[in-house]
Amino acid sequence: MAKRRGSRRPFGKEMMPGLRLQGRTAWTENATPGQDVYGETLRRGGLEEWRRWDPRRSKLGAGLVRTENEEISLLPKAGSRVLYLGAGHGTTVSHLHDIVCGADNHRGGRLVAVDLAPRCLRDLNHLARSRPGLIPLLADARKHSMIAALMPYRADWLFQDVAQASQVDIFLNACERFLRTGGLGLFSLKAASERWDGEGERALFDKVATRLSESGLELVENIELAGFEEHHMLFVCRMV
């Protein structure tokens, strides 16, 4: 069971609908009040219930702590069209749903969560039963035809976290196919899953940054996740 804290007064700073910050700790407004997703702390604040976004359980959550820019610059807005490749068991997806869709999808968002593992899809399907606007899909991130069936319009925001070889190619191809002009693409790179020449992890990250920039994407920020997710870098790009 999640730890619950009671308070009728608002806390922290409201950064955008569905998101508050208390120091560097992010909280999202719970779309399913009374229910936690992964054992996170629930907290009352004003009339809403809020879920603590654990940066040790979410690469995007770690990025919010480590970014040198404003935290909301990494996140989709309420009502956005979101594509998440490598959605896992739904930890990060659930916080994105809080922001993009909200309870009963009153914000009108659409979050397509793609994963190749049947066990992950079982968890995502369970999550989706109480979270309208969340659409799980069992598919390979490289198989665009299956994803396109659920993405009739280009995404405003795309996140990739797939531990496969050729991660960079998968991300670039997905952005080209699905991300709208001006849309934000975030790419979590796991060094051990990418082919590299043994020059060292830093050299790999630098080469990937160069390749992303040369692809035509605007490279907004590289976020080192060490301390939360070892051997990972989060690249933040914009489609131009």
Image (cartoon, helix red, strand yellow):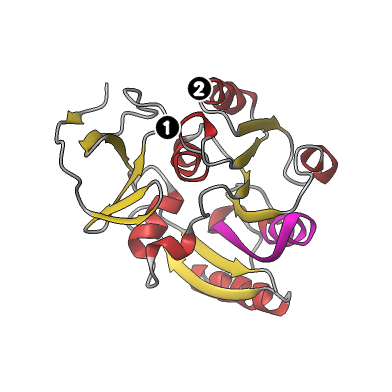
- Residue 130, relative to residue 90: is it above or below? above
Mark 1, other Cα within 10 Å: few <14 / some 14–19 / many ≥20:
many
- Residue 21, relative to residue 211: is it above or below? above
SS at badge 1 = loop
Residue drawn at 55 percent across, 70 percent down: 205
Which is more N-terminal, label 1 or label 2?
1
Q: Which residue is mark 1?
A: 31
Q: Position of residue 238 (x, y in %)?
A: 62, 69
- Residue 20, relative to residue 5: is it above or below? below
Residue drawn at 53 percent across, 24 percent down: 123
Residue drawn at 61 percent across, 51 percent down: 160
* Structural distance between the alpha carbons of marks 2 and 1: 9 Å
Q: Nearer the viewer, residue 144 or 130?
A: 130
Q: Which mark is residue 130?
A: 2
Q: Nearer the viewer, residue 192 or 43?
A: 43
* Quarter of the figure with residue 181: bottom right
* Quarter of the figure with residue 140: top right
For residue 72, side relative to residue 5 (left or right): right
Where are the magenta residues, as a range? 168-190
Q: Mark 2: which amino acid?
A: Ser
Q: Nearer the viewer, residue 115 or 72?
A: 72
Q: Position of residue 158 (x, y in %)?
A: 62, 54
Residue drawn at 52 percent across, 41 percent down: 107
- Do the residues bearing badges 2 and 1 touch, measured as CB atoms within 8 Å? yes
Q: Quadrant of the N terminus?
A: top left
- Let me know if residue 224 is in the magenta part: no
Q: Mark 1: which amino acid?
A: Ala
Q: Nearer the viewer, residue 198 or 228?
A: 228
Mark 2, other Cα within 10 Å: few <14 / some 14–19 / many ≥20:
few
